Image (cartoon, rainbow, N blue to C red):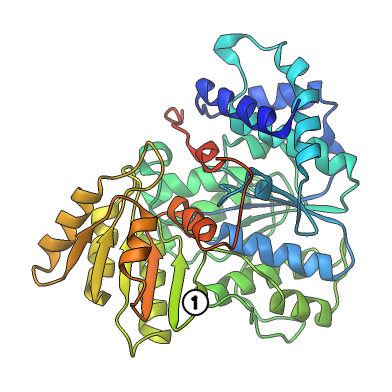
Amino acid sequence: MTYAEAIQFLYGLQLFGAHFGLERAEKLAALAGNPQKKLRFIHVAGTNGKGSTCAMLESIYREAGLRVGLFTSPHLVSFRERIQINRQLISENDVTQLVAEIQPLLKQSSTDNHPTMFEVVTVMALKYFAEQNCDLVIWETGLGGRLDATNIVTPLASVITNIAFDHTEWLGDTLAKIATEKAGIIKPSVPVVTAETKPEALAVIEQVARDNKSPLTHAPQPSTFNLQPSTALPGKHQKRNAALALATVEVLQKQIPVSKEQIKTGLQNVSWPGRLQLIKRDSQKILLDGAHNVAGAETLQAALKKDFASIRPVFIFGALADKKWPEICRILAPLADKVITVPVASPRTASADELAKEFRNLFSKLPVQVKADLDEALTACKNEPFVVITGSLYLIGEALELLGFLSADGPERGLNDWKPAKIQR
């Protein structure tokens, strides 16, 4: 089997859709020898900031000398981004080997209860991290938490970044319902750390923690390290994520000792592409930010007002149809000098014409153009001093590839596409 064939096999698993529940993942993990039982985890859920918080935790513990696995999704360009050890992407050979090893196990599943692609990738990651003798795995949920395939592990700590409206058609239409799904990663007597402050969502997290007799820590909190949670990642929201990472490290200090200097260096050296990532190209600045929901758009708005107040950007905007893109347009439109709308390279894309119509309805004098794709849009604004590309992480991945910052040997971004069934409550 070649790497390209392994990727095609994963594409083929998309036929099985994305169904919530732990039964299939647990069965597949058992067939693989339950590798999760050989590993230690920090399990991270939340609406926004999961990836950044995971990156910070990984950087801190790697600085402390641990061999740290990192499991995140979606990937921006290469599937291999999802599974990393000490920030080294899993090799093509290892992906190929894992696919070859898991194929016989899948034959023991019936067609009507076959593991989904995400469930297969989850078990592949567990198998890889165990075989590579990771000291710790930073383990990000896919969607929700309670019935997410990643929830088959028992972690050292459960971390919930925040609760906001996203994936409401599956997770629920209130903050309390969404919080219930996210808080599903809380395990009996396992400590919980959260940066959530909204009363409706926080009440749910607190109740689930009480029910499980799980000690709950609110971040930010006074640090026994006497450290200000500063990080290399830009944006005020990243200070909240840094405070959450710092609080988590403090909670686990007895199990995994980390020094003040290791924390400080880890936070300063962290990187996480596509989130307020500033790229300079000749005299042009390009800001990439995957603001794919309302809370993310508000964060981008705040960053632009604070750090780029002297210049109005040209927005290149593309979104997925199942997101609340009219509200995102409303948040971003007042900041724009001009808007170029594009389709996202996904079957789930919103129409670029519909996006343009929304911007024009919001501000009739705002110059709005529609382009066939991102490449055409970048060409159209090559002389603009400041460009912001946003609206979807899919679009950010495409931008990083076009700009030469990330690459894949073949078309792998499509592995991010999924259409889940409704969660059963």
SS at circle 1: strand
Give neighbour class at mark 1: few <14, some 14-19, many 20+ (Cα, 10 Å).
few
Q: Where is residue 63 in the image (x, y as percent from the top left)?
A: 83, 71
Q: Residue 349 appears in which quarter of the rendering?
A: top left
- Which residue is drawn at the image coordinates 74% and 19% (left, top)? 103
Q: Residue 308 appears in which quarter of the rendering?
A: bottom left
Numbered-mark total:
1
Evaluate whether residue 36 shows in this view.
no
Q: Is residue 64 left or right of residue 340?
A: right
Q: Where is residue 278 in the image (x, y as percent from the top left)?
A: 51, 75
Q: Is residue 72 left or right of residue 262?
A: left
Instruction: Identify the residue position indicated by label 1 in the image.
Output: 281
Instruction: Please tell me which residue lies in front, 157 or 65.
Output: 65
Evaluate whether residue 51 shows in this view.
yes
Q: Position of residue 211 (x, y in %)?
A: 62, 46
Give above or below for 359 relative to 321.
below
Instruction: Please tell me which residue lies in front, 324 or 321.
Output: 321
Q: Residue furthest bottom?
A: 310
Q: Split into 4 quadrants, where in the image is the N terminus?
A: top right
Q: In this view, does 256 lie to the left or right of 110?
A: right
- Which residue is drawn at the image coordinates 73% and 23% (left, top)? 28
Q: Residue 422 appears in which quarter of the rendering?
A: top left
Q: In this view, does 126 lie to the left or right of 292?
A: right
- Which residue is drawn at the image coordinates 61% and 17% (left, top)? 114
Instruction: Please tell me which residue lies in front, 162 or 279.
Output: 279
Give above or below for 204 relative to 317.
above
- Give the residue type that dot 1 points to: Arg
Q: Position of residue 403 (x, y in %)?
A: 51, 63
Instruction: Please tell me which residue lies in front, 93 or 166.
Output: 93
- Which residue is drawn at the image coordinates 43% and 62% (left, top)? 199
